[in-house]
Image (tube, grey):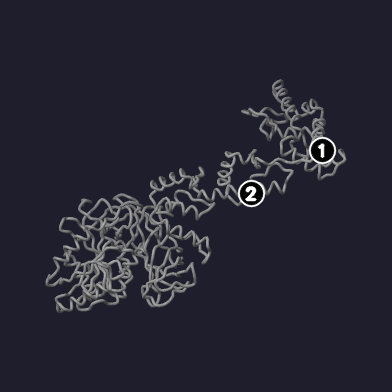
Amino acid sequence: MSSQAIHNVIVGTAGHIDHGKSSLVRRLTGIDPDRLKEEKERGLTIDLGFAPYCLAGGQKVGIVDVPGHERFVKNMVAGATGIDFVMLVVASDDGIMPQTIEHLDIMGILGLSRGLVAVTKIDLVEPEMVEIVVETIREFVQGTFLAGAPILPFSTISGQGFAEFQAVLERMVLETPPRSSGGLFRMPIQRVFSAKGHGTVVTGIPVTGLAETGDEVEILPGAFRGRIRQIQSYLEESEEARAGRSCALNLSDIDYKEVQRGFVAATPGSFEPSRWIEGRLRLLPRFGKPLKTGTTVRLHVGTAEVIGKVLSLEGKTIEPGAAGLVQFQLDDPVVTGPGDRYVVRLHSPVVTIGGGVLFGKSRRKLKAGRAWTLERLRAKEEALGDPPRWVETVLAEREGEGAREDELVRASSLPRDLLREVLERLVAEGKVERIPQGPVYLHASWMQGARARLLGALADYHRENPYQLFMEELELRNRLAIEVPVLDLALGALLSQGKVVEEGDRVRLASHQVAFSGPERELLDRVERVYLDGRFSTPRQDELPALLGVGAEETGRVIEYLVETGVLASMADNVLLHRDRIREAEALIREEIQAKGELISADFRDRLGTTRKYVIPLLDYFDSAGLTVREGSSRVLKKHHTGGASKT
């Protein structure tokens, strides 16, 4: 089928039972939309009917015929998914009836903005009655999207007025903007069956995107994957299924018994079903009482009908005609995308009470009345239809957790190539920061806060430990409760700004120095001199107080500082050696091994003029530093070792 022959617009019927919706479709298309045996026997539409309609100019559009009986409103809502233009059908001999009202409410809730009113069966009443019905309808549609729309009387039996109706219909349909095929492919499933010789077939109207023969699709919920063997659109084979046209997909590797109406065929890995979804709910003014939070309702989204509870987030009730932010707790998972329209009906009695726009799945149960939650939801609402702003709000919601590309695809319903463009732009504008590992993306405002918290944590640590120059990064991360990649990103920025100094796995504020008093500085010099003069037979830390005539607390602070700054090295068995002596020992080791090919610990002990008590910890120190390695009872230089072993 030539794609140029299809105008990607879906026309739908709406109206009360027995007002002539199916007869109108039959007159327009020559096809009986009632496909079920029961429908033909009872003369009423029970389920959805589909028919292609060829316009005078040769373009094809799809027509969806929906049931008018109140017991089948759920099927009507399923059919309304994907409708772009509505024909509200009102019979001249009946006038406005309950389902006329309910169907118009539903179409308005679903966001339709274009349509007309078809006044049928004018052959059954006097012309004066037709005029009265037309005026009644004109008043009825005031304040709705059909206000000012054409109201066209005709008879499908006699043909009176039908040519005029058809001309207006075709003109308005062609003026209706076709659906874009951009975005991820998503088709709410309206029917599923097994065709002899072909296998599983699913039908529906894609709401976004495009899929081609041979493409893989995912059926959700259920996560079944299969390939598209064949596509039919408007009774002809096609190479593509796209938004704005009714399609049938013949799928491989999927059992039709596992699929049902309400499921979705979609681009694999791009959508995630959820039992928790959030959005704004507006109650119909004609719903005569406040809706209490926790009320059990029927949620209609796409072609799915799911029972669940509606939880008001801005108060305990929502008044008729008013709107509020809500979260739905559903019995079964559904697939949604940002900006999806939905309808809510009471669980019992089953009446339509309102609907609105969804923001997508919730990551957790939300607390009612919490300012941060409400602010975040309002930001999402304002960002609908603006991809960069939407991605920014999603990342702001995730705070320090951030999100990977796959997660952002599912949260935004954006194709991967468009999402990457959006992320590059946000990073360039400084609104989003990227951690290379992953990569993971974080909102810049959270990272600014993380850097401020990091500086604050270091300042607190320095204040609590004035004699320690550095803080261990592990302790810093535990204090901040953030992951290593996030800490690395925050630290990297502060290091480049010169606000933080890093040494190995330790960090400090660039402005921080240990402030010793005069007596403390004198003690520091005395202790350092003890370890310089002691060469390779130095005192243990607990021996210093008696040796120097000062308290253990004072000597402990000094030793801690000297070790932290690398002046002293702490080894096994409480051995402390000065870095200058370690350099001497390293030079001696290199000299011995160069001369003899190996280092014998006893020879090394004798050359240092010390005892085994100091030699063994010192040799182990050089092993751990990567200078030497044991081979039997001796040591040799470790291969590829190029640097010194001392911490200077």
Q: Dividing the image into 4 quarters, which one contains the C terminus?
A: top right
Element carrying mark 1: helix
Element carrying mark 2: helix
Q: Earlier in the sequence, mark 1 or mark 2?
A: 2
Residue sitting at x 19%, y 76%: 92
Q: CA distance from mark 1 to mark 2?
A: 31 Å
Whole-percent x, y for residue 391 in the image: 44, 52
The amino acid at mark 1 is Leu
* Residue 441 higher or lower than 540, as above or below: below
Residue 556: quadrant of the picture: top right
In depth, the one of 399 and 63 nearer the eye is 399
At label 1, counting other C-alpha atoms closer than 10 Å, the crowd grade (few under 14, some 14-19, many 20 or more) is some
Residue sitting at x 38%, y 50%: 415
In the picture of the structure, the residue carrying the numbered disc 2 is 456
* Residue 251 higher or lower than 560, as above or below: below
Left or right position of 498 against 74: right
At label 2, counting other C-alpha atoms closer than 10 Å, the crowd grade (few under 14, some 14-19, many 20 or more) is some
The amino acid at mark 2 is Gly
Res. 100 mark: none
In the picture of the structure, the residue carrying the numbered disc 1 is 523
